Image (cartoon, coloured by chain):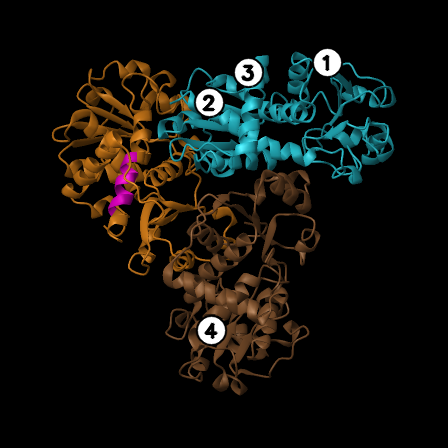
Chain colours: A orange, B cyan, C brown
Amino acid sequence: MEHLVSMKQLSEEGIMALLERAEIFKKYGGREFPGKFQVANLFFEPSTRTKMSFEMAERKLGLDILPFESSFSSTLKGETLYDTVKTLEAIGMDALVIRHPYNGFYKELVGRTSVSIINAGDGSGQHPTQSLLDLFTIWEEFGTFKGLNILIAGDIAHSRVARSNADSLTKLGANVRFLCPAEWAGEFDSVDNWDEVLETSDVVMLLRVQHERHESHDVFTESSYHEQYGLTVERSKQMKDRAIIMHPGPVNRGVEIAESLIESPKSRIFKQIENGVYVRMAVLEAILKGRN
Amino acid sequence: MEHLVSMKQLSEEGIMALLERAEIFKKYGGREFPGKFQVANLFFEPSTRTKMSFEMAERKLGLDILPFESSFSSTLKGETLYDTVKTLEAIGMDALVIRHPYNGFYKELVGRTSVSIINAGDGSGQHPTQSLLDLFTIWEEFGTFKGLNILIAGDIAHSRVARSNADSLTKLGANVRFLCPAEWAGEFDSVDNWDEVLETSDVVMLLRVQHERHESHDVFTESSYHEQYGLTVERSKQMKDRAIIMHPGPVNRGVEIAESLIESPKSRIFKQIENGVYVRMAVLEAILKGRN
Amino acid sequence: MEHLVSMKQLSEEGIMALLERAEIFKKYGGREFPGKFQVANLFFEPSTRTKMSFEMAERKLGLDILPFESSFSSTLKGETLYDTVKTLEAIGMDALVIRHPYNGFYKELVGRTSVSIINAGDGSGQHPTQSLLDLFTIWEEFGTFKGLNILIAGDIAHSRVARSNADSLTKLGANVRFLCPAEWAGEFDSVDNWDEVLETSDVVMLLRVQHERHESHDVFTESSYHEQYGLTVERSKQMKDRAIIMHPGPVNRGVEIAESLIESPKSRIFKQIENGVYVRMAVLEAILKGRN
């Protein structure tokens, strides 16, 4: 694997190989490449969990990590992403982890640079390592994807997570359903309400209401969203015994999910974050091994 | 020690054990934990000396340090400090060094997270590693605290250093006196003027006029402050031969202290900064040893 | 060498020793000082290539690198550069790489601090490691400087690169000519137009139009600059077979140089960036060896 820019590039076997490798990292710790590879994390949008997760994965693999401050780089002098990447390639970087607000930012890079690109989120497009950590968390829980009922609830049209996950889960044999306001459905079909799906769902995957991406307050107040589309304490009682709750974070407490459910026994929200480190180690290893 | 959030949690013996360990680090260099622990420095207020001092202490101990840019983190998406800390715990961090403008920020964290918290300054509250480095510098100079006369001069009410130091020094047997404008005395009793205390003081500890915290210019001009409450060259001549001058920095030159005294033989201002690294190594070691 | 602040401090032999050392690093990789020295990169102006190049050079030498965020440091509390440097000296730093908007910022530091200073660009003054990488790129290409015709084109008066390079290249035996708008010539003599110099030039060194430093749009539009002072495709055809094109970056595409020439066979623009890492390793090594 030279780059990882979209879940679409991974076959079912490719996904499973990464999940199995992540499981090894989780059980036995990192395999070190001390001082052999240089990487940088280029985040052109604010992020704590994804950026810190990559930073941790990179350290656990023993990589050299060069700091990149997007707010203080030559992009302020008008330098394009392409020129920044070519500069970092010339400096000798092996891989760049990039988050950027433009959908498909990587299209102008792949094939034109010898540095490996890992997409850490492009606008409302893809976020493949988030998808992989979601898949890993489900697989760790159930040991399979075949026949699982997955409910994805929330702002589907604007979510890079929803798109990647829906595609991959379907490919791996799960049955994916959506629940969302009509305004946010995009090309997806939504079920009408929670009641018809909650009792048969193995996974309830909540999406973040992205106040920073659109004027959601024009459409809903926080409490009316919670009432209609959030996972309330009342609704959670309809869930199967072994069913789990997932959320990519950061959580809007009391909006997508009731505050008291976040750290409840059914929640895998912090487990997802933990698993993100192992999945990213697997991705980085797969890419860097190819450069040896 | 699981956390270090306030000097109040340390007994006299606890303080002395840290100072003795810092002395060992100063004489013989670091004890390495290479690659064993992951830490991050979360500074929600500008800082050079405290942040860089922790960074140096962490490197000298061989820790893995994950970069955290508060100005570019998910706090911009409204994430709370609690959620950020829980995320970093899930990612696998062992300890977080935190500076935050809210007094007592750590109260919502301690007992609710398994990651260790080190308070690097909370509002006008505590700043325990600054206190420890002040104590170390005095102890290194005089070999004891018993019977020393310590004068703390300046903006006592707004200083986290003054509170921590006054408590600890008194506990360790020193005699602490204060000199400050009536407006800035808070609950402390101020002596009337320099003359009655200078000749008997072993340590003159100056505090920073915090222009960024209150409208000090409404109360004093820089030169009138220097005249009344600053350590002038003239006043310094009244000091005992072995007496020393301390200041936590950054110094407002010509305000709290005459420019020419900053690097004079009596000044321990840069020695304090140097000692900060060893004291922080001792604190980090004490906390991380407990996690093994 | 204790500091590197200006090309003027280097003799012809001093320059050649650094270039030869850089060549060794390029061929055989780094010589490690693991954990022996602590350095920091203080950039008070935006930069990608220079900062990342130093970061890479430092990692390849195995140095400990402390992060410094100028936008979040105590300079916000009014701390002077001198006080910041004295603080970092006290913390135990060995060398500081500094870029600062003030010409000659290093004059108040050299002789007053024991930490080594490397000038990474001072206002419109010097930028010695950029000069060294330019020299290295020319020397790598031609094996000598004697008798080479070097043309420097663009905003000469405001360019720290032009000044350093002109001095050094002349000292090393090259013949330096300038081409620039009369408004930007400063103390330099400009030739009248490209035609009289292109056919005899071995190196065409283009300078960046620094939109961020002056109101260049008042003087030229982008296309009129390209027409008169840029290296157009048409002009490039007049160049000698073995002649090369250089540019310090970041490039204003279609202004100083035609877009299609940037990655053309004559261009050494990305080679310059690559060579910057080896040259900076040589400088850092020369300075740190002296501290042992």
Q: Kindly identify which residue carries mark 4.
A: C139
Q: Residues within 10 Å of mark 4 (few under 14, many from 20)?
A: some
Tag 2 or tag 1, which sits nearer the N-term? 1
Taking depth in this image into account, of C41 and A76 the one nearest to the observer is C41
Q: Is residue A281 magenta?
A: yes
Question: Distance of mark 4 from mark 3, alpha carbons?
Answer: 62 Å
Q: Kindly identify which residue carries mark 2.
A: B287
Quadrant position of residue A138: top left
Q: Residue at x 66, y 73 (%)?
A: C183
Q: Which stretch appears magenta?
A: A278-286
Q: Residue at x 27, y 37 (%)?
A: A279
Looking at the rendered structure, whether the residues under marks 1 and 2 are on a common chain is answered as yes
Question: Regarding mark 2 in the picture, which secondary structure is present there?
Answer: helix
Question: Distance of mark 1 from mark 2, alpha carbons?
Answer: 33 Å
Check disc 1 and give the amino acid type.
Answer: Glu
Q: Is residue C121 left or right of residue C29?
A: right
Looking at the rendered structure, whether the residues under marks 4 and 1 are on a common chain is answered as no
Q: Is residue B213 left or right of residue C150?
A: right
Q: Residue at x 54, y 87 (%)?
A: C196
Question: Distance of mark 3 from mark 2, alpha carbons?
Answer: 13 Å
Q: Determine the main secondary structure of the stretch shown in magenta.
A: helix
Taking depth in this image into account, of B20 and C80 the one nearest to the observer is B20
Q: Residues within 10 Å of mark 1 (few under 14, many from 20)?
A: few
Which is more foreground, mark 3 or mark 2?
3
Which is more foreground, mark 4 or mark 1?
4
Check disc 4 and give the amino acid type.
Answer: Trp
Taking depth in this image into account, of C85 and A178 the one nearest to the observer is C85
Question: Regarding mark 3 in the picture, which secondary structure is present there?
Answer: helix
Answer whether labels 1 and 2 touch (C-beta < 8 Å): no
- Which label number is shown at residue B14? 3
Please give the chain letter of the residue carrying mark 3. Answer: B
Residue B36 image point, x, y percent:
38, 31
